[in-house]
Amino acid sequence: MRFTNITLAIALTGAAVTTAHAARDTIQIAGSSTVLPYASIVAEEFGNTFPQFKTPVVGSGGSSGGLKQFCAGVGDNTIDIANASRQIKSSELAECKKNGVNQVLEIKIGYDGIVFASNANKAAYKLRPQHVYAALAAQLPSQGKMVANPYTRWNQIDKALPNEPITLVIPASNHGTREVFQEKMVDAGCESYAAIKSLDKEAKKKACTNFRKDGRVIEISGDYTETLARLKTSPSAVGVFGLGFYDQNRDRLRVATVNNVAP
C-alpha cells in the first residue's frame, strides 16, 4: 500500500469571489474520486446542520480535472472547492492567480492509501514495484538496448506470480492517485534496472512513463466503480484502487501485498 495526501483547495474571500457567491446560492465542489465519498458525507451533513443553506453539490472528475475547474476563474461557471488526492502544484497556483483566483487555501484533511486488487475468486498477488513496471512498460532493457515488452503473463516476470494474463487497470492522468502510483510504484520499479538508471534525464523519463499500448494497460478516467466494472469483464485483471473504496468492497476484491506488506 502507498499513501497519498487528501486535500481541499478553497478560494478565500475577494471581490470577484463574493460576487460569484451572491449570484449562486449553492456551493459547487468537484475533483478527486478518492475524496468523493467523504466529500458527499460532509456535504450532506452540512445541509442537515444548516438547513437555511442548500446542500453543496459534489462532483467527481479527478484531482487534476477539479483543480483545472477551480483555477479557471470566478463566477457561476466555476467551482468553489476542489478536492484532490495530492497537493496542489505550483503551476496550478500560477494558473489560479492568472485567472483571478487569489488567496487559495489548501487544507489537508487526511491520508488515503492505494492498493492493488483482483477479483475475489482469483489467487492473491505478491507484487513489488519491479513487477508492476515490468508488466506495464512499453519497452524494457535487454542486452544493452530497449526492446518491446515481451511479457504477456505475470509468471513470465516472476515464477512466484500467478499464471494469469497481464491486464493492469490504472487511474488515468487526470487522477491524483495516478501520480502516487507513478512515483511510488512505477518509477521505483523503473529505476531498479541499472540500464535505465544510467540513462540521461529525458531518456529515463521516457522509459519510466511510456506504457504499453497493446491492451494490457487500461487507463480509467472515471471513478473506482469503473475500475471495478473492468475487473468484472476482465476476470484476470489487477486494478489500482483507493484504500477506502477497497474497504467498502472487500467481498468483491482480493487485495495484493506490495513488498510483502498488506493494507
Image (spheres, rainbow, N blue to C red):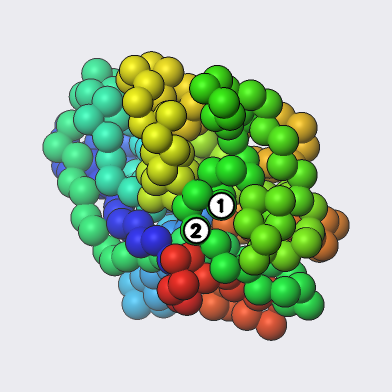
The three-letter amino acid code for the residue at tag 2 is: Arg
Give the quadrant of residue 200.
top left
**Could you say which is closer to the camera, residue 251 or residue 84?**
251
The three-letter amino acid code for the residue at tag 1 is: His
Q: Which residue in the protein does label 2 denote?
A: 128
Q: Position of residue 228 (x, y in %)?
A: 70, 61
Q: Give the residue at x 35% y 77%.
A: 49
Residue 181 appears anywhere in the view? no
SS at circle 2: loop
Q: Give the residue at x 55% y 20%.
A: 145
Q: Which residue in the protein does label 1 denote?
A: 131
> In the rendered view, does 58 fall on the left or right side of 16?
right
Q: Residue furthest bottom?
A: 251
Give the quadrant of residue 122.
bottom right
- Which quadrant does the N terminus fall into? bottom left
Crowd around label 2: few <14 · some 14–19 · many ≥20 (10 Å) = some
